[in-house]
Amino acid sequence: MVNSPDNRSSGSGDGTVRERLLAAAEELFSEQGFNGTSIRDIAAAAKCNIASVNYYFGGKENLYVELWRRHHAQIVGVRIESINEVMSRSGGKPGLEMLLKSFAEAFLGPLMDSNKGPRLMKLMAREMIDRNLPKDMFGKEVIRPTMTAMQEALSKACPALEQSKIPLVVFSLVSQLLHTILIKAMHQGIDDQELAQFDPAMVIDHVVAFTAAGIRAYAKEEGK
């Protein structure tokens, strides 16, 4: 194996240097954006030589993609695991509210984590404004696998719902959950206690009840 060019990581394995670079890059990209962050900035924050970025990732662009790929894997893994767990516990015939609540909690969990959530949301906001990822990456790695698993589960939870409508139902659910995160961020620091109150569990229960009622009404209308 070729020796690492990082002379300041004495005693730390390649994995440690690589993790330091990823951690430093995530912080800098979230605060300064992709274009506002240089390889020199990342190397300095990670206490590594500049050559380490190219050695481990082949450049800033690949480092950025790898950073997002790790987030995508975690996000999708949690969501699909929640769906599979409900399917397993229910013998393949999940209750609608059970499925929706499990998915909602899994969806919001990583984004509302007090340690990692705010930084991930900043990264998402910057990527939405200034696109630097391959254009089809999010669709292939996040949307498609999540939609596939959720469509199959919803078809079992509500057989009367037309298959072609299920993607719209999932998009509606996801939109409510994303708006929940946005509102939570907007409410932080508000002096008005009534407006500042935010109970994620209560919001999830509301979204689940609202969505389940909508799905059943939708399916009933289609059955007429």
Image: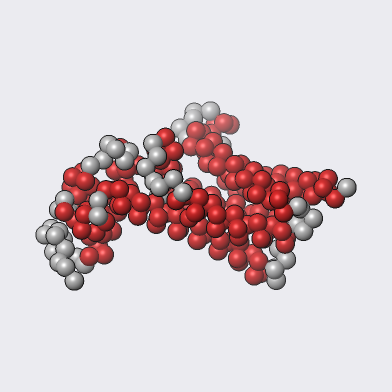
Q: Is residue 13 visible?
A: yes
Closer to the camera in the image, 38 or 46: 38
Query: Residue 166: horizontal and vertical position, in percent?
Result: 69, 51
Residue at far top of view: 192
In the picture, measured across the screen, residue 116 lies left or right of residue 83, that is: left
Q: Is residue 20 visible?
A: no
In the picture, measured across the screen, residue 97 lies left or right of residue 119, that is: right
Query: Residue 215: horizontal and vertical position, in percent?
Result: 74, 48
Res 98 quadrant in image: bottom right
Q: Answer above or below: position of 182 versus 191.
A: below
Query: Residue 76: horizontal and vertical position, in percent?
Result: 50, 57
Residue sitting at 55 percent across and 42 percent down? Answer: 178
Query: Residue 224: horizontal and vertical position, in percent?
Result: 88, 47
Residue at far right of view: 224
Q: Answer above or below: position of 144 versus 182.
A: below
> Which colouring convention does the figure follow?
secondary structure
In the picture, measured across the screen, residue 20 lies left or right of residue 108, that is: left
Residue sitting at 21 percent across and 67 percent down? Answer: 13
Residue sitting at 20 percent across and 58 percent down? Answer: 55
